Amino acid sequence: MKMLKVENIQKSFGKTEVLKNISFSLEKGEVLAIIGSSGSGKTTLLRCLNFLETPQRGRITVNSEVLFDSSDSSKKKDLDVRKKRLHFGLVFQNFNLFPQYKVYDNITLAPLLMAREQIRENGSYYGAASLREAQQLIREEADNLLKKVGLFEKRDSYPGDLSGGQQQRVAIARALALNPDILCFDEPTSALDPELTGEVLNVIRGLKSSDSTMIVVTHEIGFAHDVADKIIFMDRGLIEEEGTPQQVIDNPQSARTREFLARFNQFGD
Ligand SMILES: Nc1ncnc2c1ncn2[C@@H]1O[C@H](COP(=O)(O)OP(=O)(O)O)[C@@H](O)[C@H]1O
Ligand SMILES: [Mg+2]
């Protein structure tokens, strides 16, 4: 069964059509890498999936639940945006941590708010029936996630005291703390000095082996080749080519894909 189905997404800003007709799907546990030149619509696509932007057309289905359907206005009322967002996690290019909160609080803040709301509405949060029990659960999970990204000893530091690579690893832990079905990364290493990209890419690699379903927008072509099950090359708001890394990166069929990859090989990245 497809975990994610994206059908015919179209998004314009004013007269500029940024996403023309994007369709793809993803199985549970698959990693999709999206590559393409700057301005091709990669960030806009991730923002549409995370309901930070609303497409003009298309449909988004997660685990057979239609989260967005432009042809059915009632669907928009079924689920409020916040609940829809819970299916996706997003790690931004510039980390976007809360600078005034410690690492630990950056990770637990959203789950605590969620627990309060769910206990009020449904009487439980992942089996915890009281806020006190939920707090315990969230604390343990935050510690586990910090260990997973190798930053347990930094739990009481502030983001400003961490390196860019460490901040991005905290951002990954924070996204995981809400248990998203699909974790999205928007050029997670492009704001980092080259010597810090490896530690972040290794964390993402580790998530793949724990069966996370992920969409990674990246310019790290070698990493995409190693980690992704599937590659999409986006060009001017369209999927120009898609397939396995062997197909798209090693043996591209489209002249535009070849041109894009040649630029990378020439300048390195
Ligand atoms: N909020 C916005 N308003 C107007 N134009 C936008 C907005 N966001 C993105 N764009 C335009 O959409 C195009 C694609 O942008 P983006 O999705 O950021 O591409 P990429 O991430 O591939 O570099 C660009 O031409 C950009 O200027
Ligand atoms: Mg972008």
Image (cartoon, rainbow, N blue to C red):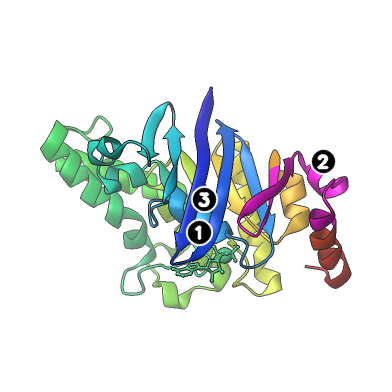
- Secondary structure at badge 1 equals helix
CB atoms at circles 1 and 2 under 8 Å apart? no
Left or right: residue 228 compared with residue 215: right
Residue 163 percent across, percent down from the top left: 54, 73
Compared to residue 257, the image places residue 119 above or below, namely above
Image: magenta residue range = 231-258
- Secondary structure at badge 3 equals strand
The extreme front residue here reads: 15
- Determine if the magenta segment contains residue 241: yes
Say which mark, if any, is on residue 128.
none
Residue shown at the point (70%, 38%) measured from the top left: 229
Mark 1 surroundings within 10 Å by alpha-carbon count, few (fewer than 14), some (14 through 19), many (20 or more)? many
Structural distance between the alpha carbons of marks 2 and 3: 23 Å
Residue 145 percent across, percent down from the top left: 45, 48
Total residue callouts: 3
Residue shown at the point (57%, 35%) measured from the top left: 25
Amino acid on which the number 1 mark rests in the picture: Thr
> Can you tell which of label 1 and label 3 is closer to the viewer?
1
Left or right: residue 81 compared with residue 89: left
Of the two numbered discs 1 and 3 on the same chain, state the one appearing first in sequence: 1
Residue at image mark 3: 184
Residue 33 percent across, percent down from the top left: 65, 48
The extreme bottom residue here reads: 160
Q: In which quarter of the image is the C terminus?
A: bottom right
Amino acid on which the number 3 mark rests in the picture: Cys
Residue at image mark 2: 247
Question: Viewer-proximal residue, 89 or 62?
Answer: 62
Callout 1: CB less than 8 Å from ligand 1: yes
Residue 247 location, quadrant: top right
Residue at image mark 1: 44
